[in-house]
Amino acid sequence: MRKPFMAGNWKMNLSVEEGVSLALGIKDAVGDYDAVDVAVAPVSVVLPAVAQALKGSRIIVGAQNIHWEQKGAFTGEVSAEILASAGASMVIIGHSERRQFFGETNETVQKKLLAAHRAGLHPIVCVGEQLSERESGRTQAVVRGHVQGAFAAVDRALALKTTVAYEPVWAIGTGVTATPDQAQEVHAFIRTLLADLYDDDLAQTVRIQYGGSVKPDNVKGLMQQPDIDGALVGGASLKVDSFAAIVKFNG
Ligand code: 13P
């Protein structure tokens, strides 16, 4: 019912040349594989070249962040509209690295989510708790705050065109993946939050990705869970072989 959706978050990696080379490799490996939606998110200055390399393919190209305003005196920032004009059709919003290092808050996430929709970009909104929050039993409270904060001003029609990524911070780049059961528990919880904010139908339609040390050897167990619809992949998305293996988790 929900088509699997695998997205590679390249983070601050790969030059223009390296990005284009990886994109072409991914296109070769999974460009014809239509059982799964596939996206890559390069660095914003690399994005136009990657979008050009993937033109005409099924692979979606997205950015890793946006500013919420359309234009203006915001030195160093990039708007959703400008990224769309450069070839983006998707954007990652509220990644924990932005929350942790760049002052992203539930409020800025909410503004960016609206800005993404304003420009017609498909947003992937990231939510997830830190290790200390999990250990002190606050996982649900943190995830509730992230989800309710992000969606507060988003109407149903736009919420339907949004993907959520559950990324427990302690699993990102650490090699420690959440177990399929741990991830499933939070994914199911996120669906109840969406059902409360909107309705059951919407909660059953929106795709929820898992992110945090997803690799070819653990993706299958995660994808077997009923509420896990895909992955947001960091490290393993930087190599054709590992990313293609994740996309083709079903064989
Ligand atoms: P890793 O797959 O490297 O743990 O990164 C996950 C992530 O942050 C994707 O957005």
Image (cartoon, rainbow, N blue to C red):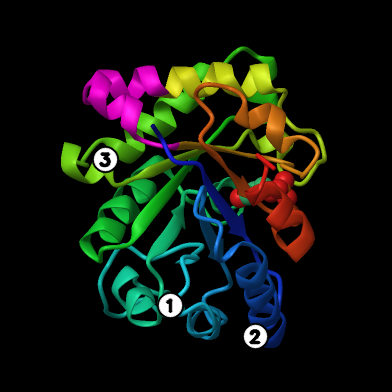
Could you say whether the residue bearing mark 1 is in a helix, strand or loop? loop
- Crowding near pointer 1: few (<14 within 10 Å), some, many (20+)? few
On screen, residue 110 above or below 27 = above
Could you say whether the residue bearing mark 2 is in a helix, strand or loop? helix
Residue for badge 3: 160
Q: Earlier in the sequence, mark 2 or mark 3?
A: 2
Residue at point 61% right, 58% down? 9
Q: Which quadrant holds residue 102?
A: bottom right
Quadrant in which the C terminus is drawn: top right
Residue type at mark 3 is: Leu
Q: Earlier in the sequence, mark 1 or mark 2?
A: 2
For the residue pair 88 and 250, the one nearer the viewer reads as 250
Residue 18 seen in this snapshot: yes
Real-space Cα separation, disc 1 to disc 2, in angstroms = 19 Å
Residue for badge 1: 56
Residue at point 40% right, 78% down? 87
Residue at point 65% right, 39% down? 250
Real-space Cα separation, disc 3 to disc 1, in angstroms = 25 Å
Residues at discs 2 and 3 in contact (Cβ within 8 Å):
no
On screen, residue 21 above or below 115 = below
Residue type at mark 1 is: Gly
Looking at the magenta stretch, what is its main secondary structure? Answer: helix
In the rendering, which numbered label is found on residue 16?
2
On screen, residue 11 above or below 245 = below
Residue extent of the magenta highlight: 191-207
- Crowding near pointer 2: few (<14 within 10 Å), some, many (20+)? some
Residue 129: image location, x then y, percent = 59, 30
| Residue 38 belongs to magenta span | no
Judge left or right: residue 3 versus residue 251. left
On screen, residue 7 above or below 51 = above
